Amino acid sequence: MSAVLTPVRGSQAVYRLNPVAKLAASAIISVALVLSIDWVSASVALAAEAILFLWAGLGVKRFFLRTLVVWIAAPLSAVTILLYGRPSGATYVQFFLVEISDGSIELAAATMLRVLAIALPAVVLFATVDPTDLADGLAQVAKLPSRFVLGALAGLRLVGLFMDDWRYLELARRARGVADTGRLRRFAGQAFALLVLSIRRGSTLATAMEARGFGAHTERTWARPSRLTAGDAVLIVLACAVAASAVTISVVTGHWNFIGAQ
Amino acid sequence: MAPPVAASLPVAIDIRGWGWRHAGRSTWAIRDLDLTIHPGERVLLLGPSGAGKSTILRALAGVLGGDDDGDSTGEIRVGGVAPNAARGCAGLVLQDPDAGVILARVGDDVAFGCENIGVPRDEIWHRVTSALDAVGLAVPLAAPTSALSGGQKQRLALAGVLAMQPGLLLLDEPTANLDPGGVVEVRDAVSAVLESTGATFIVIEHRVDVWKDLVDRVIVLAPDGGILADGSPEEILVTHAAALSESGVWVPGFAPERHSRTARTDNATLLAAHELAVERVRGTIVQSGISVDVRAGRTLCVTGPNGVGKSTLGLTLAGLIAPAGGRLTATELSRGIDPRPIRWTSRELLTRIGTVFQSPEHQFLAGTVRDELSIGPNALGLSDLERTARVDELLTRLRLDHLAMANPFTLSGGEMRRLSVATALATRPRVLVLDEPTFGQDARTWRELVSLLGELTTDGSAIVAMTHDSDFVATLADSELRLAASSESIGPTVVAR
């Protein structure tokens, strides 16, 4: 599978944290930051996160490789807001629907910082999450139904096989003499073929799982215990601190701009 | 010797007037079956494809499903109770090594079954390590399952059911997709396990040779349901040899005849590889330094263990993926177009190089067998008359005429294989590249394929086959290209046969 999907492994403290705690931490920061659109709260959160990333368990190169998508998406969303965002204050450029004004510039900056402040910790925290550990956590700590969680986990393994399938489907179309024209139609046909293959693989997987007693009437046990530790508490406290300081400083400096207030 | 896994007691099987019909089908997959198997018996289950062998195994494992999945009559008892209630008491290993892998890490995968049946945590890890020992899979518990070879994956699946300590071990063609090394690995692991647990054992397998010394009873199902023969291996395999062979079972002592061919004077080089390097993922070269000629009227077999790069080489020779290094030229075939096959259009490829993929599902495009065969001729722009003639001829020749209107995805394994070969032949390519054409095929399909490919070379086509099948190589190959793992110091070698 591609380098973006496989978990990073290491021995630092962050690797021992419970994936559910990581999930909660990034949720806390997201919720606090989506409540307002202003540049102060996002900047404070981002600054605090930048320090915490030192303990994220990723080297500099890995950090930027993993978060590359975020660094591309953030400026793009800012440009969109800059050109089409709600205008206010002095206007600098106006052309058809495009209007760049003081208001849209401020909104664009706030949006970019916000995307970074929400997405970076989420991506960084999840880079070190192993899917199996996440499933263990979701079932044992978050108490989600085990059938659902384990089904999803086992299905995830098929993603790698689907990538191989797609490639073979593509090569096979070249071999069958139909790959010269009609790219769009061929794509649709190939997507359908992949769907058929994936249903087949899925039902075989279900049989294999049932053959190992999956769905038996007995109470399931867990080979790998998943529980919250002091380290997980520290992570949650840190996330709350980041969220609280971002909101407080923004409110105190008068920049807080509650999303439903306008 | 590995420490024995303390097993639950071997169970008895009692089947009374049992039948099963898959939901949506009008015919019964199996009907009125009466069968008793005593605790600890080791049974080889034989019969033509479609006789319901796999259905019986799934029923015994309790994974056939409920009322939504089909209708049943009569009753099945495993250790005195219904199989659904006794899940975990029977362990089932399936044919496709990839299908048996459930989780990402070896230890977790083996533990999965124990978790499901509620084994306490400490006990689970004891069972996991002793099950891995018992099947001889010496890899770390944290090793990724995706990196295992086919034989290792099957031993992993075996360890997974073994850790559940089943009183009944069920294997559905566990070695059909493995290279010869993998077959022996799995057979020996099963043998060691049965030795230590004494579990009741049922295996389905076309290749009788692999298992005949391990079993003490052979049951042959009749094509129309019921039991054709039941007895000791020696007795059944001798007295019913002819009927078994006809229904596709590889009867021991089967010696394929070498395909005889008329000496040809025209053995033009159709494809020439010079210091060829091949890659599947850009930048990861799997084989290099391959120099070999593909000649008209000749068969080249490419051999080597699972994962060595045979398929990748095949796809490269077939003009489907670009060489990573070296040269691949087809001067004789190109006739005015670029001599490098990868530069040809999809249509230009059709009459020059045909490819038969390892799994036929990847190459089917149409809703019926007839349409499937027409795709190539249509792409060439042949007249209706010519197209119909070619399609009809192939339908008859490959015994697919009664299936002309069937959906290709509903065919049996052997029928799919014949159809996939037929689709390639419909455009009459000068070179035919086949990836594992005999994988998982029964003896009858095997004979048909071999004689068809033999005829093609006699007619002047060139054949390239990636294969594990030593009988296939012995019967057809004019030369053999042996690939070794890149970690070994021997490079690719060409051997004349």
Image (cartoon, coloured by chain):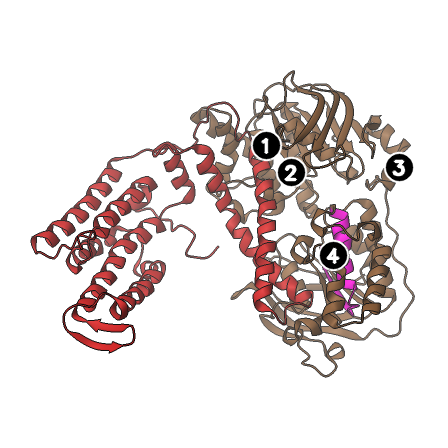
Q: Chain of mark 3?
A: B
Residue drawn where x is 61% and y is 50% of the image:
A196
Q: Judge whether A5 appears above or below B73 on screen.
A: below
Q: Residues within 10 Å of mark 3 (few under 14, many from 20)?
A: some
Label 4 – label 3 distance at C-alpha: 28 Å
Q: Which mark is residue B243?
A: 3
Question: What chain does mark 2 sit on?
Answer: B
* First-in-chain label (2 vs 3): 2
Across and down, in percent, residue A78 comes to 27, 66
Q: Nearer the viewer, residue A211 or A252?
A: A252
Q: Are marks 1 and 4 on the same chain?
A: no
Pointers 2 and 3 in contact (C-beta within 8 Å): no
Say yes or no: labels 4 and 3 on the same chain. yes
Q: Nearer the viewer, mark 2 or mark 4?
A: 4
Q: Amino acid at mark 2?
A: Leu
Which disc number belongs to residue B420? 4
Q: Which residue is mark 2?
A: B94
Can you name the residue that lies furthest to the right here?
Answer: B262
At label 4, the amino acid type is Ser
Please provide the residue range marked out in magenta: B413-437
